[in-house]
Amino acid sequence: MDKKKSWRKEQMTPRSKLTLCLVGNFCVLAIVGCVVYSCATAGTYWRFGPHPDLVIISVTIDTWQKYGLLLGLIAIVESSRIVVEEFGMPILGFSIYNPDKKLVTEFTKNELQFFANAMFLISAIRAVLLVMVQISQLDIAIWGVIVSQGASVVTIRHLLNEKTFEKDDAHKIWIN
């Protein structure tokens, strides 16, 4: 039994944990997608593009111009959300919630209180508006995901470029 335990311990490197989480996450998504697809009925959610009865936050999206404007606004909101979450929120998180950081030198207590509460309030209002928009039609929700992931690729690459890596071999990303 000790051999089994030590074998598991040796096999669960950070890379193998991330790989397992990624595969598990994808499997859950595939299962949910199959269930939703098999149970889906005709409705307004499964359409694409503008329609006379597509109303988002009291605005009728019935032309391709309005639809394009909507997608542009979603792109701006999602991109800004990603930039804020990946650059700004870690500063707040590490400054406020890190139990090991007892001395804060970058901000006063009131500044940190203001920044945190203002960021959280704006993020919450934005989230409500995005939910209202994205539950209206699947193509709009998928567009928001694509834009946010595109912005995330850019911001993560920027953050990674600020670091140095002991193992910096791009073509061996999946090899242990």
Image (cartoon, rainbow, N blue to C red):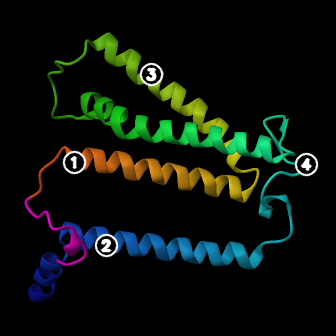
Frontmost residue, 109 versus 4: 109
Classify mark 1: residues with Cα within 10 Å, few (<14), some (14-19) or many (20+): few
Q: Residue at x 36, y 45 (%)?
A: 155
Please name the predominant secondary structure of the magenta segment in the image.
loop
Horizontal relation, residue 49 to residue 129: left or right? right
Classify mark 3: residues with Cα within 10 Å, few (<14), some (14-19) or many (20+): few
**Residue 99 percent across, percent down from the top left:** 21, 34
Q: What amino acid is found at the position of numbered circle 2 in the picture?
A: Thr
Q: What amino acid is found at the position of numbered circle 3 in the picture?
A: Asn
Q: CA distance from mark 1 to mark 3?
A: 30 Å
Disc assigned to residue 161? 1
Q: Which residues are magenta?
A: 166-176
Q: CA distance from mark 1 to mark 2?
A: 22 Å
- Reading the image, the residue beneath label 3 is 117
Q: Residue at x 59, y 50 (%)?
A: 144
* 119, above or below 174, in the image: above
* Nearer mark to the viewer, of 4 and 3: 4
Q: Please tell me which of labels 4 and 1 falls first in the chain.
A: 4
* Quarter residue 175 falls in: bottom left
- Reading the image, the residue beneath label 4 is 53
What SS does tag 3 mark? helix
- Reading the image, the residue beneath label 2 is 19
